[in-house]
Amino acid sequence: CYDKDIEMLQEEHISDDSPDMFADCSPLEEHELTEVKVDTEEDICDNIEGDRHESQDEQTWLGATLEEIRNGSLPTLPPISPSHNHTVFYEWPRISTCEPPKPHPERVRDCWDSSHVRMPYSQHNLYPVQEDNDRSGLRQRWELIQGGLLKTMLSCQQLETAILSYNSKYSEFWDFSILRMLFNELFTEEETDNFFTTLLPRIVQLALQLPTLITAPVPLLVQHHNHTLSFSQLQIASLLANAFLCTFPRRNTAKRHSEYATYPDINFNRLYQGPETDKRAASKCEKLKCLLHYFRRVCTKAPVGVVSYKRQYVDHKSLPRWDRSQKPLTKLHISSQGVIEHDGERMLQVDFANKSIGGGVLGRGCVQEEIRFVVSPELIAARLFTEVLDSTEALLVVGCERFSMHKGYGDTFEWAGDYRDKTPSDSSGRRLCSVVAIDATRLGNRNVQYTPSSMMRELNKAYAGFYSPESGDRLAGVATGNWGCGAFRGDAKLKALLQLMAASQAGRSLAYFTFGDTQLRDEIFHIYTFLTDHQVTVGQLWRLLCQYYDCSFRRGKFVMELYPFLYQALSKKTTTFGSMHYVLKSINSPIIQEQALEISKSLGNGSFKANNDSMRQ
């Protein structure tokens, strides 16, 4: 039955070379998306290579090279092997890596309890309906789902009717205005017709194959438990097809005491709702383009890889004593150019996460996490089974594939065409792409982030993500950036040091991307150089950071910025003119130079004062 389903899924082959996300084998000029220019893969590669050469010519990076950060790194997770804390949903070991692995077990094991995902096909999934005699009764919801989705759907209205046929209690609440906007206003008539006649039937078919693709109960990744789930990419595609069609039960309410109140939503209904006048309506449509393109790809050719989702919890007894750490600061590469998902190849790539995995990806959100999730939609599947993260937990996803190019950010985000992910795979068939989701603290008062308790929380959170039970000096480096800044209001200069400390403690090197901010790049690198030249350990830096709040916070504000304080605190140990001259030479920021000059005057160093003008020069 499984083999027959795979053949049916792919019997109408869509050309791999077609740039249209809906057409079978149509040339670009006939079905090109009108809103976004689609670059060819060759154009994309040329642009990337051009950026690399430009970066090298202009020296947009400092510190260790990316190759040094990557050199000899081990896979993030050990080879897949079923165990009490690792659930594998396909036959293991795999017989062939050239086709999707077969589901395991052969027959469905129905499970309907609070410890597992409640699957839409469960015989226990009952739904109230009105009978012909006006009496209410219960029917198996999977029958309603099949009945609604197997009807001909040639318009957005018919798709809405089908979805509401098994979600009738929400018929007066769910709004599909963004979906209508996409098909009725942004797509051409031909593109819309191609979706409803070609792609949508295949999405439906993929969704209805769920009972033959995922036959074992799916455990929930609950708080304070280390557990890993490994699926085939095809199994994940079926889960996402069901999310697209809003079939998952008990996942449509956000009430505080509902069963899944501590889990993200998974059905796509919030992504479909408007109003069209919402300033995020356009970015919602672009996110939908990414997701429809993903379905077009997986319905063209069934993917053959696998993906692992690991909830990683570090209990408080296992956390480092930061004040006692003797670890030296690790290697650092810092660049004002590049992006984590591309330049962080073969590294542990940080997702600036919400504690509810994926954040607003199925709503109005469209920043770093949400964008990463729509260009690599297999990340979205984690929302189905991952409870919100606690303070010393992270989610690690290994093997996800990237399907789309993009440009812009927030309100300017746009789908920018197909992306062919050529990342090699490990021995288990997972792409060597590791994404770690760690959630920073959302700050009401920015000053709170400098308190020892707040810094401790961020350090422990980053360590929970960077830690690996695998020992050795070949752990993959971390690719990160301004984690918890932006909407969460964090200080990038502080967050950079905290991530550096966590990576050092975990035995990983660090690649840091400042996303175009050259001043931030220089300031972080120069304080890093200053600290390493002074052989400052993780423990010593932690104690200095704790002193900063006590020494610099006066009457509700800071009288000194963080980096000048660190320069001053270390220089007090050797207050000669030579040491202060070194400090100023290592600073490439006029603002911090000026602050350091003022700080140095308070040291009472006459020789420094005499040479003040020369050092300004």
Image (tube, rainbow, N blue to C red):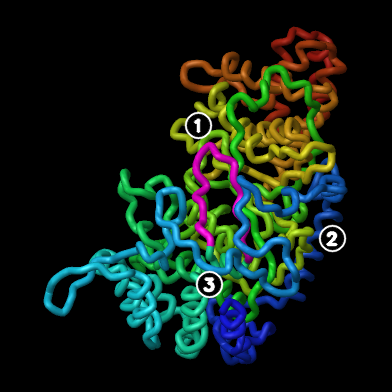
Q: What residue is rendered at 69% in x and 33% in y?
A: 502
Tell me the residue at 49%/50% (across/down): 220
Residue type at numbered disc 3:
Thr
Q: Earlier in the sequence, mark 3 or mark 2?
A: 2
Q: Which mark is residue 446?
A: 1
Tell me the quadrant of the picture where the C terminus can be found: top right
Magenta-colored segment: predominant secondary structure? loop
Could you tell me residue 531's position as x and y percent?
A: 79, 26
Percent across and percent down for residue 609 are 79, 14
Residue 377, by quadrant, is bottom right
Q: Which mark is residue 212?
A: 3
Residue 310 visible in the snapshot: no
Can residue 19 be seen here? yes
Q: How far across and how far down the image is residue 288, in percent?
A: 49, 70
Q: Is residue 462 above or below residue 179?
A: above
Q: How far is mark 3 from mark 1, CA to CA?
A: 51 Å
What span is in magenta?
A: 216-232
Please give the residue where the numbered disc 2 appears in the rendered image. 53
Kindly identify the amino acid type of the residue bearing the numbered disc 1: Arg
* Dot 3 or dot 1, earlier in sequence: 3
Q: Position of residue 345 (x, y in %)?
A: 76, 55
